[in-house]
Image: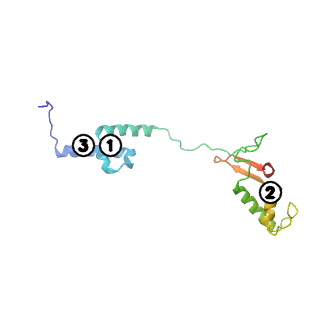
Amino acid sequence: MSGKKETKLTAKQIAEEADIRNEKIKKIRILSKMPKKDLKNLTDQEIDHLEQMQIVIDARETIEIDQVHEPVELKSEGKSKFRIGPPTLTKFEKARIIGARALQLSQGAPPFITIPDGVTASFDLAVAELEKLVIPITIRRVLPNGDFQNIPLEYFN
């Protein structure tokens, strides 16, 4: 004999305990992602621990509104002309500049250089102008937080 007194529970008491257990589980939102079949295998100690964890999570301070960040221009100073990005034009910047300048030339804008021999299209003339860095344009490089740097084309190699 073990000395423990065995108590028999009625069907009503078993159903009430199951209802209490289910109510506890419903209150613990972190269990909502768990498969229902695994919820049945939780011990009372695990449920109590998870209930305490849910209380801790609920007590955490939440940030309702992000602080507003006003974009700031990063100035080019001294040796560090480039504070954002590489010290050369990226292929995307080159494509954008050549495309915009070729469009201007095709619509009758005057060229900034004398037209070299063999150039027949506005695209080729735009490429030649970019190689000589004579196009009066400024590149704006932007960081994810909105800060930016305006870099004149003549700063590039």
Q: Looking at this rendering, what residue extends furthest in the right direction?
A: 114
- Residue at the farthest front position: 118
**x then y, percent, for residue 108:** 83, 68
Question: Residue flagged by tag 1: what amino acid is it?
Answer: Lys
Residue visible at 83% across and 65% down in the picture = 109
Residue 131 has which mark? 2
Please say if 19 is above or below 97: above
Q: Which residue is mark 1?
A: 24
Determine the CA span between mark 1 and mark 3: 11 Å
Residue 78 vs residue 16, the one in the foreground: 78
Amino acid type, callout 3: Glu
The residue furthest left is 1
- Disc 2: CA contacts within 10 A as few (<14), some (14-19) or many (>=20): few
**Within 10 Å of the Cα at label 1, are there few (<14), some (14-19), or many (20+) other Cα atoms?**
some
Residue placed most toward the observer, 135 or 11: 135
Please, is residue 3 above or below residue 125 in the view?
above
Q: Which residue is mark 3?
A: 17
Q: Earlier in the sequence, mark 2 or mark 1?
A: 1
Given residues 72 and 20, the one toward you in this image is 72
